[in-house]
Structures are given as C-alpha cells and as structure tokens.
Image (cartoon, coloured by chain):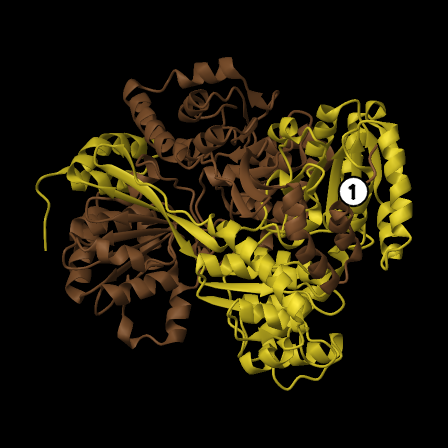
Chain colours: A yellow, B brown
Amino acid sequence: MKTFNYSDLTKADIARLVQRNVDPANEIRTLVEEVIEQVKQNGDSALIDFASKFDKVELTKLYLDRAELEQIASAVTEDQQEALQTAYANIYKFHKTQLKTEDKVETMPGVTCWRELRAIEKVGLYIPGGTAVLPSTFLMLGIPARIAGCSEIVVCSPPQKNGKVNAFIAYVALMLGIDKVYLVGGSQAVAAMAYGTETISRVDKIFGPGNQFVTKAKTIIQSTTTTAIDMPAGPSEVLVIADASAQPAYVAADLLAQAEHGIDSQSILVCTSQDIADKTLAEVEKQLSILPRAEIAKQALNNSYIIITKDLDEAMDFSNEYAPEHLILATENWEELTPKIINAGSVFLGNLTPESAGDYASGTNHTLPTSSYARAYSGVSVDSFVKKITFQYLTEEGIQNIGPAVGILAEMEGLHAHRNAVSVRMRPDNNKF
Amino acid sequence: MKTFNYSDLTKADIARLVQRNVDPANEIRTLVEEVIEQVKQNGDSALIDFASKFDKVELTKLYLDRAELEQIASAVTEDQQEALQTAYANIYKFHKTQLKTEDKVETMPGVTCWRELRAIEKVGLYIPGGTAVLPSTFLMLGIPARIAGCSEIVVCSPPQKNGKVNAFIAYVALMLGIDKVYLVGGSQAVAAMAYGTETISRVDKIFGPGNQFVTKAKTIIQSTTTTAIDMPAGPSEVLVIADASAQPAYVAADLLAQAEHGIDSQSILVCTSQDIADKTLAEVEKQLSILPRAEIAKQALNNSYIIITKDLDEAMDFSNEYAPEHLILATENWEELTPKIINAGSVFLGNLTPESAGDYASGTNHTLPTSSYARAYSGVSVDSFVKKITFQYLTEEGIQNIGPAVGILAEMEGLHAHRNAVSVRMRPDNNKF
C-alpha cells in the first residue's frame, strides 16, 4: 500500500486518489445488448440456451419449486441455520422500523396534504451464485421486500453445474416464504425480469449485485425500459479512519476483509500518524499469511493506499471527498466525528464494530452505494421497495382560500385551462348531473 | 377522444392502451452526446457557443448575479408576489414535515443500529425557460433543497433573447436565497452540472424537467457519471376517475388543463357510465372554445381516450395498470377508493380538488413520475435531496453476542478475513498501541 501525506497532496492529487472507474465495462455493452435482445425475442428458450452456454448446464425447467428447495435446504447444518436466523431477526428488527405512516398536514385552512406508502408490486432480486454464493445478500433484499409488502418477488440465481442452487440460497428462500427460485444468471436474468418471459414475470424494479455483465444490463434496462434498479454498483470498498486509540490488529483485519472480496476492491486507511500506518501494515502482513484468499487480498491492497493526516478532522475531510461505501471510525473519539460525516454508505463506530458485523447480521443493509455514489445515493432499505404517493384534499373553504393564488400563478405561466380548473370550482352556479 | 368499454378489452388491449413511449428521443442520442462532449472538453466557451447557436443570444457572462436578479424581479406585480408567497408557504409547510430524525434500534443486546439524514452537498436545478417559463418548478425543487440543507444549489435556466431570465424566475431565486442563476439551457446545462466548467460547479444530483434534449442528457449522465438524476421524465398526463357524483364541468376542466401542456400530453377519463362520458365531452367542447391554447389541447385529446367501467373498483384496476402521474378521484366516494390505489404519482381527492391546486400551491410536489414510472418511482420530496446513512455501534457485549453468527455466515460464504475481523475482536489478548 502506497502512503501519502495529506498535507503534500494538491486538490488535483486528491481528485485523482478518490476517482474510481465508474464504467469499466463499456466495451461489453454490445455483448450485453445482444443478450437482452435475445431474451426479449425468444423468452424462455433464450434463457435455456444461455444456461447451456454460460453456466454449462442443460435445464429442462427454469425454476426450482418449493419441494425441490426443501430438499436442497436440508443440507444446511443446525449451526448454520441458527446463524441465518440470527441475521434474519436482526435485519428484520431494524428494517421493520423503516416502515412509517406519515401525518396529514393542513397547509392552509381547508387544504390538506399527506403521503401514503405503497409497496412496489413486483420486484426482482438477483442473487449471485456460482463461485460467490451470497445468502446474506438474499436476506438483505428479501427481508425489506417482505416488510414493504411487495406482492410478487421474483428471484433469479445462476444454476450450479448440477442444475440447482446452493443449499444456503434454498434455505433463505424458504425463510422468506419464497416458493420458487429461477435458475437464471447474468445479464439474461436482468433482461428476463425487465421484459418478462413465458415463465418469469416482468417486474417494476430490479435489485441486487452481480458481475460486470449484470451491472451493465441493469444500467441499460434503467435507461431503456420503465423497470427501475436499486442503484449502480461497482467494486466494494472500505475507508478506515484510525487514530492512536485504534488497535492495529483490528484495523488490519478490516482492511483485509475488504481486500479478500476481489482484486478490484479498495481498502483505504486514513490515519493520524506514520506509526499507526506502520503497525497496521505489520499486522496486515501477519494476518495475510494465514488467509485462504491471500492472493486476491494482496492484489486488492496493491490498488489501495494510506493517507497520513494531522488530525481526525482532516481525515474526515478526505473521507467525505472519497465518499466510501463502508466507513469505519477506528477511534474511541467517534462521537465527535459522526456529525462531520457527509458522504458514506454505512458507518462502523469504534474499535469493536467491524464491517463484517454489518455485512451479515447487525441489522443494517449491506447493499450500499460504491464508487463515490454515496454522495447522492443511500443504501437499500424498506424505502427502496415502496413509493410515497402524495394526496391532497380541498374543502369548499380550501378551494376558496387557494383558488386566487392558483389562478394568478397559472396565468403567469400562460396556462389558462389550469386557471379555469380552479375558477370553475369557485363559482356557485356549478352544473350537476 | 376514443371510447372503450372496459369489459370489451383483452389483457393485450389494456397493455397497449397503458403503453407510453418511454424513449421517443433515441434518435437524438448522438446529437446530445456531442453536446455533452463539447461541454466536457471546452467548458464555458462551449456554453457561450451553444447560447449563440441554440438560444440566439451572445453572452459575455454566463450568469446573473444578485443585483441583476433584483433588477429583473422588480417587474413582478404585488398580486403575483403574493401568489408566489402563498405557494412558497404551503410547499414549505408540507415539505418541512418530511425531514425526520429516526430512532436508534438495539437489534440484540449491545448491537445498536440507526440511520441519519445528510443533505446531498451539491445539487443542480434545471428550470426550463424560453416559451415555457415555470417559476412553480423552481419553487418545487428549490424549497426541498433548502429544507434538506444542500450546501450548494446550482441553478441553470436558458437565457431569453435579451440575455436575461424571466422576472418570475428571478423573483423565485431571491425568495430561495439563491444569488446566481446560470444562463444555460438544454443538454449543455445538464452536461455543465455533471462535469463542471470554469464557472459552474460539478453537482452530485441534477433535478428538473425539460425538453427531450434535457431528458436525454439526464439519462446519459446517469449511466456514465456518478451524478444522479431525480427521475426519468416523459410527457405529462392525468387520469380522472369519475362516477355519477362527479361534475362534468370540473372533469372537463381537469382534462383540458392537462391537455394544454403539450400535444403529447395524455388526459384519460375512466368513468362508470356512457352518460358521464357524454356530458363531460360536451363540457370539453364548450370550454375548449375559449382557451388560448385550444389547438394544443385538441391535439393532446386526440391522443387521449375514455374507458367505461361497470364500477369504481374496475376503474381503479385500470388506473393501477396505467400508473398515472396525476390521479383525480372525481367522486364523493373517494375515501373507499384510496386504499386501492397502488400506482400513482399524486392524487387529487373529491370534486373540489383540481390538479392545478397541486401543480402550484396545495403544498405537494409537482415533479412526479410520468410514463408509468409511478410503478416504481415516487415524486420529488425532501427525501430526494438527502441520503440516509446507516450507523452501527457494538459494545463488548455486542461483539460477543453477534460474533459467533457472523463467523459462521462468513465461513458459509468462504470469506475467512470477514470471520477474522470479528474473531480478533472477541479474543481477550488484543494487542494495543
């Protein structure tokens, strides 16, 4: 990991350091567009062809039903079941509080406005499979969808070589009361959920992480159909702010946990002395040696760096510029720092709160904005699965109170029929049926 | 307006009727990409060239400052000022209630999670100018941005032939405490706010309606930069549900108010008898004759239609399929209907609540999802100008409680460094600095 002194960096240096490649996969656009077109034209048969081509499996049926899921899920051990249930309970408990009713507001006498939540009817969840099996992602998407009350939850996950999904995915489906998992992966899964096929319903919004093909398909779908997506996605990243009250073994463990995700992951350390950096790097070396995914982690750390700042405020300035997906405040003084956070996806406070707690089971969602999208986007929550519809109701008094202003404003904009819609209601000589 | 009996319609007919063209402007993509590239490369000088080419005005300076805005705004009459102030007060009052703090949740002993709001730092507002001057849109975007606490609000509006903006735009800028309005319109304004130029700051999210060039630029920006957009936008639309308790003059006025927006607007009437349809059409003819924008409204009505249903429930089924931007419940029985609304942008209840009340001054936002996007998107609100950042804090008890589950889950996903980040914190023999 390269080390920089914050005070040596120009504005342009900082801009370069915080820059991530937001569209690394533009060269695959044509390929993905072709897959989408095939699915749009040929539906299920295209999906079966792509399973043969990409997943090397011959499917006779595009989904697993409840009985099949139960059989597959029976391989999950009791310990694993308990761990999944702990995660489920915490995620449910936190997300349940996000579903709120709102009060009515009388903006002027006789004019009442409010918002009501409505679940998005049909949602699609993409759960990566193959080498990276992520039951935790299934929980993170399925639980808020259930709490929101989505009436149809379509789940796509790529088939394994045996034409099934992993046991953990099957178990989580059953926990969520989902009776069908579609054996479809990659950009073809996104296309199927956006356009619908003979067996797969078209959905209103697609959620979930995936490889560059999935991500590219999601951005294409977002700009060419009315199906929405949760957010753009890039490689995962963590930024750790550490001062002398941090513990190097913990900081090192957090940097490595991020680095093992993939060779394009970033683990950034922003600390207040060279001493902290040195001790952390020594710990990284020590812990790296026993990691099964050491090679991946090493490469990711080569893309990562350390910034030395004069104090925590300067560290937070850099963090806000970087806008990290995960921000760990490895300091006993975190309470002073949180009000200064402007841009971050999810924040881990103090020395005893590792990112992996939030990745799995603290209760917060791990589907978060990467690549500096945290400047404008929030992570997934129940909010992501609902719409807020505005309502307004005017009484006789209300229309008389608001009518004159509306008439003048409509005239200012040259919209006389807008004015008329108010004035016709203000006259006593209304015609009735 | 063509009339259809709902009972005669097949599923395919309904799908065709509710279909809107979501990407009518794909042929202009190359043109818009060229404009974006020019702005990216040449900054301010490109903007001055485009003002000359598209707005037919030679600018020596790209913005109006406070003194200039004050001078321009002095043309606003007292009546107009009062109307703008009424709108401002109602919109402010309703939107202010959307800014909420959330409670902390202890998901298990020693594990606490919560969300905190943070304003998006830099936002860009696009306010259409030229023939369609929309001070109301400026209020609808500027007020929630101010309530959210955005630290920088960049406003772009196309220059008029005299190199200025309209007096109403200037007045609203001053109401909002905005001291600068950039004289930039079209796709070049979107490009300037997404990439930044010498005078215009790069922003994190761009809001506002516009013509097809602006809309295309926004969708390109959304998929190629980290700058977000409020939502995709298409032509405006209303769906009115009417039964025998409606008043034909009001319904006709509402259909016409929508139709006068543009020739691509849609005004859909869904009513429970042919009689209501006939009486409404007679009223439409009568009111149309005195409208200045009658020609536009006539063409829009040609693209519109009437559906006759057997009851209000059937009418609501069709409305939910259509997912209208604006939904008017022209019936005294609206309270029975509102729980059945699934997809809509903003809803106007009963006979005395015209859409134009919400367009201008009831308090709700008029920046809403069109083109059936209401299935998955909400209208603009204070939510659109903030991020919700998740936080978590674990105590010693917390890490001991959650640690075992996290360890098992990490192992299930093959991520040993994730497990280690927890287990290193659970051991008593921690090394310290």
Looking at the image, the residue that sits furthest to the front is: B428
| Left or right of residue A338: residue A253 | right
- Percent across and percent down for residue B368 are 42, 46
Residue A156 appears in which quarter of the rendering? Answer: bottom right
Looking at the image, the residue that sits furthest to the left is: A429
Residue highlighted by disc 1: A250
- Percent across and percent down for residue A94 are 52, 49
Residue A331 drawn above or below residue A104: above
Residue B142 drawn above or below residue A39: above
- Dot 1: element: helix
Q: What chain is tagged by disc 1? A: A
Task: Work out whether residue A108 or residue A262 is closer to the camera in this orientation and state it.
Answer: A262
Residue A128 appears in which quarter of the rendering? Answer: bottom right
Residue A297 drawn above or below residue B208: below
Task: Work out whether residue B159 or residue B271 is closer to the camera in this orientation and state it.
Answer: B271
| Left or right of residue B10: residue B111 | right
Q: Amino acid at mark 1?
A: Tyr
Question: Does the rendering let one see residue A1?
Answer: no
Task: Work out whether residue B332 or residue B20 is closer to the camera in this orientation and state it.
Answer: B332
User: Which residue is at a point 75% across and 62% down the rendered structure image?
Assistant: B411
